[in-house]
Image (cartoon, rainbow, N blue to C red):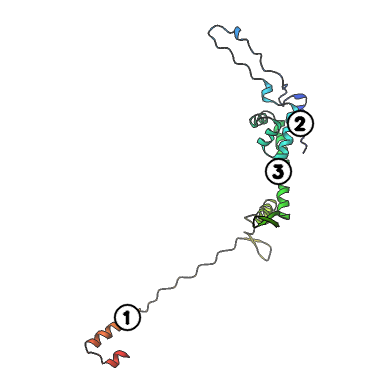
C-alpha cells in the first residue's frame, strides 16, 4: 500500500516549520557555570521529536498494511511512543496516520466480507489423520456485517415500527389488554369429604356394631 506524505514535510521540515536537524538552544559548557551551581541540562533537540521523511513514509505504509501501531513501529525500527509523540506535534503526520488506518480497516472489512460470503476451509481429522476438509460459514459474522452496512434494515432497532395499510407509521404494536379479573363467587362452598376419613368412620362404626357387615362392605 502506498501512503502519501504531506508536502509540508518535504526536505525534512516538520509541520511547524522547524528543520528536523536543528537545535532549539546551544548547550552551555559545564565550566561556564558558577561554583556551587549545578550545570544546566542539555536542551532537547528537535530531531528527538521528529523523524526523517523516509522513516515517516515507511511507518505509514506499514501501518496501512498491518493496522497496528506497535507492529508498524517494530517493522520500521522505532518506538510506538515516538510515533504517538510525533502524531501529537505534527498535524500533517496525524492526517496521514488516519488515512493509513482507514486503508487498514478497508482491507479488514473486505477480508471479513469474503469469509462471510465464501466461508473458510477447515481440515477434518479422523483417527489422528487428515481425511479432507469442510467449508464453514459464520452466520454471526454475516449478521454483524449486515447490521454495520445496512442498519436501517438489519439493525437491532429495525422492525420496531409497524406500517398501517395507509402507509403511515403506527409505532410499535400495542400490548394486548389484560384479561378482566374474575369476580369472586358468592355461592357458599361445599366441603368435599375425605375418602380416607369416610372409610375410617365406617370401620369404627362396624367395630362398635352400629353397622351390619354387608353395609360396611358396600
Cβ atoms under marks 3 and 1 closer than 8 Å: no
The residue under the point 54% across, 6% down is 35
Q: Of circles 3 and 1, which is in front?
A: 1
Crowdedness near tag 1: few (<14), some (14–19) or many (≥20) residues, C-alpha within 10 Å: few
Q: Classify residue 46 by image quadrant.
A: top right
Can residue 134 be seen here? The reply is no
**Mark 2–mark 1 distance (CA, rounded to whole Å):** 99 Å
Q: Which of 103 and 137 is in front in this view?
A: 137
Q: Is residue 213 left or right of residue 60?
A: left
Determine whether the residue tagged by mark 3 lies in a helix, strand or loop: helix
Q: Position of residue 51 (x, y in %)?
A: 71, 26
Q: Is residue 177 left or right of residue 164?
A: left
In the picture of the structure, the residue carrying the numbered disc 3 is: 105
Label annotation for residue 109: none
Q: Nearer the viewer, residue 202 or 145?
A: 202
Q: Of circles 2 and 1, which is in front?
A: 1
Crowdedness near tag 3: few (<14), some (14–19) or many (≥20) residues, C-alpha within 10 Å: some
**Mark 3–mark 1 distance (CA, rounded to whole Å):** 79 Å
Looking at the image, is 84 positioned above or below residue 138? above
Q: Which of marks 2 and 3 is nearer the N terminus?
A: 2
Q: Position of residue 49 (x, y in %)?
A: 67, 25
Cβ atoms under marks 2 and 3 closer than 8 Å: no
Cβ atoms under marks 2 and 1 closer than 8 Å: no
In the picture of the structure, the residue carrying the numbered disc 1 is: 196
Q: Which residue lies furthest to the left in this view?
A: 208
In the picture of the structure, the residue carrying the numbered disc 2 is: 6
Looking at the image, is 33 positioned above or below residue 135? above
Q: In this view, does 215 lie to the left or right of 55?
A: left
Q: In this view, does 34 lie to the left or right of 152?
A: left
Quadrant holding the C terminus: bottom left
Amino acid at each position: 500500500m502506498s501512503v502519501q506524505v504531506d508536502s509540508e514535510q518535504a526536505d525534512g521540515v516538520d509541520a511547524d516549520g522547524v528543520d528536523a536537524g536543528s537545535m532549539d538552544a546551544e548547550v552551555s559548557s559545564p565550566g561556564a557555570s558558577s561554583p556551587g551551581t549545578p550545570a544546566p541540562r542539555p536542551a532537547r533537540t528537535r530531531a528527538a521529536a521528529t523523524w526523517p521523511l523516509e522513516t515517516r513514509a515507511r511507518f505509514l505504509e506499514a501501518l496501512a498494511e498491518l493496522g497496528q501501531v506497535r507492529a508498524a513501529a517494530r517493522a520500521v525500527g522505532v518506538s510506538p511512543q515516538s510515533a504517538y509523540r510525533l502524531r501529537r506535534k505534527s498535524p500533517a503526520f496525524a492526517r496521514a496516520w488516519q488515512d493509513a488506518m482507514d486503508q487498514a480497516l478497508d482491507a479488514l472489512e473486505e477480508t471479513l466480507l469474503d469469509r462471510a460470503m465464501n466461508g473458510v476451509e477447515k481440515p477434518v481429522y479422523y483417527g489422528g489423520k487428515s481425511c479432507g476438509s469442510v467449508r464453514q460459514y459464520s452466520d454471526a459474522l454475516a449478521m454483524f456485517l449486515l447490521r454495520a452496512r445496512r442498519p436501517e434494515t438489519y439493525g437491532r432497532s429495525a422492525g420496531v415500527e409497524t406500517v398501517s395499510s395507509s402507509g403511515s407509521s403506527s409505532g410499535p404494536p400495542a400490548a394486548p389488554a389484560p384479561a378482566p379479573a374474575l369476580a369472586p363467587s358468592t355461592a357458599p362452598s361445599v366441603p368435599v369429604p375425605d375418602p380416607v376419613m369416610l372409610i375410617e368412620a365406617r370401620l369404627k362404626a362396624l367395630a362398635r356394631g352400629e353397622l351390619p357387615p354387608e353395609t360396611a362392605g358396600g
